[in-house]
Image: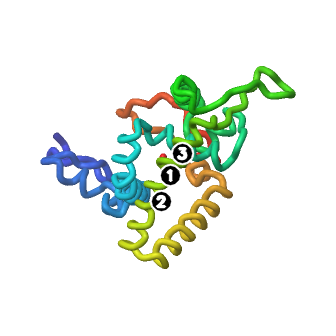
Amino acid sequence: MADGGRKPTGAPGRDKGGSEARSRLKLRDFSLSLPMSLLRAREAAMKHFRPTLRHFGITEQQWRILRALVARGEIEVMALAEATYLLPPSVSRILKDLEKRDLILRRGADHDMRRCIVSISPKGLRLFDHVGQYSEAIYSRITRRFGAEKLAALQASLREFDAILSETPSISESLDLGPPPADSATLPRRGRPPKNGD
C-alpha cells in the first residue's frame, strides 16, 4: 500500500480497539446520570412502600390512581392519565381491574356521553383510608431517617426542577442532531407518556 498501511488522517482507528475508543466523546460517569439518580432515589423510597401495597393487593399504579382520585375527585380518564403520568391504555386497563373490585365508579360526561368520568367509590375510599395510615407511618419514619428540613428542601428543589424543565421545550429539539450513524439501525418511534408526564 502506498501509505504503508496507515489509516487516513482523521479516520477513527479500529486497530486493537483502542484508537476509536480514545476518539469517542467522554460522557459523565454513569453514576452521575441525572435520570438514573432520580430512578435510584425513587427505588430507594418505593422499596419501603411496596410491601404494604402488596399486602393489601394493590399495585403501585393502582395506588397512584386511587390517590389521584381522592385528590382530584371526579376526573376524565385522559386527565387522569396526565395527572398520574401513565399511558391512557394502561389507565384503561387499571380502571377495569379497580372497577371489578368495586373500588371506583364510572359515568358518562354530562356534555359528552362518549367521555368517561371516574371517581373513587365508598369501598375504594375505605381501602384508601386504611392503607393510607400505614403509608403515613412509612413517611414519618423516612422523615426521621432523612431529616424533616432536608426532606422539605428536597421536595422544594424537585418541584422547582420540574417547573423549570416542564415550562421549556425539549432541549433535544433545539440541537442539530444530524443523521444517525450509517451502521446503526433506526429505532421506530414509540408513544410516550402524556406531559403534565414513573
The picture places residue 152, in percent across and down from the top left corner, at 52, 73
Query: Would you say the residues marked 1 and 2 are in contact, meaning their CB atoms lie under 8 Å apart?
Result: yes
**Direction from residue 35 to residue 111 in the image, left or right:** right
In which quadrant will I find the N terminus?
top left
Amino acid type at circle 2 is Glu
Residue 85, position as x, y percentages in the image: 57, 43
Q: Position of residue 164 (x, y in %)?
A: 63, 63
Question: How dense is the environment of label 2, judged by Cα within 10 Å: few (below 14), some, or many (20 and up)?
Answer: few
For mark 2, give the secondary structure: helix
Could you say which disc has been placed on residue 132 in the image? 1
Residue 193 in view of the camera: yes
Type of the residue with mark 3: Phe
Residue depicted at x 39% and y 34%: 182
At mark 3, the secondary structure is: helix
In the figure, 186 relative to 73: above or below?
above
* Left or right, 43 with reference to 4: right
Where 108 sits versus 66, above or below? above
Q: Residue at x 54, y 70 (%)?
A: 157
Q: Disc 3 designates what residue?
A: 128
On the image, the x and y values in percent for residue 119 come to 67, 36
Q: Quadrant of residue 40?
A: bottom left
Q: Which residue is mark 2?
A: 136
The answer to whether mark 3 and mark 1 are in CB contact below 8 A is: yes
Tag count: 3
Distance of label 2 from label 3 (alpha carbons) = 12 Å
Depth check: give the residue in front, 173 or 157. Answer: 157
Query: What is the CA distance from the residue labelled 1 to the residue labelled 2?
Result: 6 Å
Q: Label 3: few (<14), some or many (≥20) within 10 Å?
A: some
